[in-house]
Image (tube, rainbow, N blue to C red):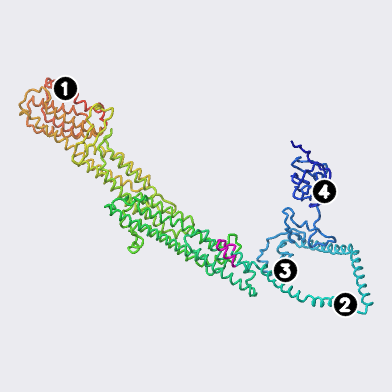
Amino acid sequence: MSRVRQPPLVTGISPNEGASWTKVTIRGENLGTGHADLIGLSICGHNCLLTAEWMSASKIVCRVGPAKDDKGQIIVSTKSGGPGTSTVSFKVLKPDKIGILDQSAVWVDEMNYYDMRTDRNKGISPLSLRPANPLGIDIDKGKVPQKDIEGMFPGMSGDFTSENFSATCYLIENHSSTSFDQLRTAAGTLKRQATQKNEGSLAYVKGGLSTFFEAQDALSAIHQKLESDGTEKVEGSMTQRLENILNQASDTADTLFKEVLGRKDRADSTRNALNVLQRFKFLFNLPLNIERNIHKGEYDVVINDYEKAKSLFGNTEVPVFKKVYAEVETRIGALRSLLLGKLLETPSTLHDQKRYIRYLSDLHASGDPAWQCISAQHQWILQLMQNTRDQQGEARIVVSRLNLRRGSSFQTPRDDSWHGGGPQQLQFVERLTDVVISQLPNFWKLWISYVNGSLFSETGEKSGQVEKSKKNARQRQSDFKRMIEEVVTRLVLLLRGCLLPTSLPEAQLRLYGGWDHTPPLIGTHLTQAIHTTRLCHEALSALEIPNDLLQVIQDLLLELRVHCLLTTLQHTAEDVKRLAEKEDWIVDNEGLTSLPAQFEQCMVQMLQSLKEPLECKPSEVNILQMEAIQDQASELFVRIMKVFISCLEELSTKTDGDLETSHISSDLGSPDLFSNTYDDFKPTPEQRLLIILSNCHYLGKHTFLNLAQHLDTHGFTGTDKILHVSMEAVRELDSGVFESYIEMKADPIVGSLEPGIYAGYFDWKDCLSPTGVRSYLKEALVNIITVHAEVFSISKDLVPRVLSRIVEAVAEEMSRLMQCVSSFSKNGALQARLEICSLSDAISVYLTSESCGCFKQALESLPQLHSGADKKLLEELLNKFKSSMHLQLSCFQLASTHPVKR
């Protein structure tokens, strides 16, 4: 078990004050067990652990850092004892800095001028030690533009450390608005500084006089010694004699060591050659290094080595260096060709293109690699678009052959979607726009980089190349605009050849068409094509391509939207025409089949599918505000309405053999709950007419109004005209069908009256006293009840209209028959009045002004009843008739029963 040590305690420091970076010795107790145990040392709040040297558990040596506090404690922290305490303190002194131009009589420690924190000998610039304001007054810059100063004083500078320093420039730059009194004060300050400097120099000389005198005495003693040696000896001075001895020794040495020295010279030559090879191994190894780095793809290294070799040996006159450098140029030429090939290679990413262009620019390749790349990319995009068309053409041929083998034909738009991509035209549009969206943005960005010079420098350090690039770009703006225009025009022509072939001349159709053997697109496919084309236009607009270059796409979109609208309306008319085949004759409580709802649903779905084509994107035209399009759309809508009405008319005239067996469901609340009457229902011609009448009534009251509201919601104009024409057409159909039904039902009833009246050779002049209503009238009422039941079973709302017309026909016939009688006997008149009153009372609910007038005329043609007995008998017989026919006549009460739900 390890013993916990006491925390460190600092009891002394020597010295106890000094400037930053002063070396100090710290003494104390428990200062750690070793250097690894020492984890913290701070003096006056500054961490000094980096310079600390652990000597023993009671001694540490370090340097004081640039502390923030003037005076503070010494804190030592160890792993074994934790943070410690101090009984002493250290005071940091702020030393006076001596400038590099100031005179000093002592050696100045230059450590203050180095950054010791990072342990890098990064000297402070001498300019940072110059006086910031030599005049001692406030500086006021920016009053006079620098360009104007350079124009007035060419080649001069206001920087007083410059060789071309001009006091006038300095004053204009820094004191253009300073008053004369302030400048006079500044001049006095300069004079005082000069006087102090001169006095300081003299003081430095006075302080060092003893040193100068000591040096002078030493030199004089050496001179006197040499002079005395020269006068005592005959051979000359001591130096002359020494020279003779050395020359003799040299000659003797040359004789003795000539061979050795020769070998030494040869060795020196070899050594020098090796030194040259070693010293310039960079150049001699450069050709091989270039090959290796090219093989690795490290083109940056090759370019840096080439730039270095060119700066060192580009203008050399040394033959061996020239030979090696020529080999380097050969390898660099091959690299230029390699990089140019990679640059023009397609496909390629924008990053690689920029990289290769910079490489070629740094290698000073001839021509303009950036423009060559732009031209190659332009041709590549056009080729991709052409390849897309050719590939789609091959796919059409394959599909055509397969269909011929199967014995099929292109009758529906779905025949060519067997490979899961929809119609071939739609596939082509998507692939073509994908090519443009994927390639044109990089093409545009490459041009923008070429224009702003970022191809050569992201930071602007290669200003010469950047300016050259901008100049070339300005000269080629029209050429690039022509390239973009060609790509966009080719896109539009290919799309027109696929989607709007009739909009192209014959010559262009042969080049960009070729879709003759494919079925035309329906509205939903055209909507998808518009969506895809819009996405392409939005992607190109986001690149900030000028709008005039994209206008052809806007024109194409406008024509596509109009074509989609008209095509959808035409196809809808065909779909509506086929609705007659879907009529199942199953009626609901209102006497309606599903046909009106199917028609309305078809129209609503059509309008929903037109939502995107009719939507106006920014910079697009509202096609519904174009007068010609409004007229065409209105005509097509009217045609659709008339087509549906024609379907109803066709259904009303179909024979029984044309109809399939249908089923009418029975409601739980129906009186026929326990019967199978409607399990196998086949409507009669009369029932079909009633169903058509009910549907026509619903169209006029609901469907057409709903559709008009939908048209208004979607922005269609001319709704009133469409509604008016549709209403007129449905009213015309309703009138014709109604008259047909009345003719079918009223004629038999009316035709049975006259034979029934005169059955059994009945004579109004010679007849018995009436005992009740005769059978012909009851039969007529039963027939009317049958019609009522038939109409009521289909639509309750049609009962008053149908029964009123039938009653009018019956009343008119009774009036005619009564008026044709020449004379009545008393009993005949009473019998006629009984029957007319019984009939009019039984069907009173459905009497109209015309039928009332007819009954009135019939009664007026009869003799009046004067006898009270006759009137009483008439009343009794009427009551008897009503009582006996009560059950049958109850159906004529409007609220007595409910319609059968079907």
Residue mark closest to the camera, 2 vs 4: 2
Tell me the residue that label 1 is attached to: 884
Residue mark closest to the camera, 1 vs 2: 2
Q: Which mark is residue 164?
A: 3
The reply to whether residue 70 is visible in this rendering is no
Identify the secondary structure beneath mark 1. helix
Quarter in which the N terminus is drawn: top right
Q: Position of residue 192 (x, y in %)?
A: 83, 62
Residue mark closest to the camera, 1 vs 4: 4
Camera-side residue of 300 and 413 = 300
Tell me the residue that label 2 is attached to: 240
Q: Is residue 617 left or right of residue 36?
A: left
Q: Amino acid at mark 1?
A: Ser
Q: Which mark is residue 572?
A: none
The reply to whether residue 79 is visible in this rendering is yes
Measure how far apart labels 2 and 3 are at the Cα level. 52 Å
Q: Which residues are magenta?
A: 287-301
Quick one: label 3 or label 4, which is nearer the N terminus?
4
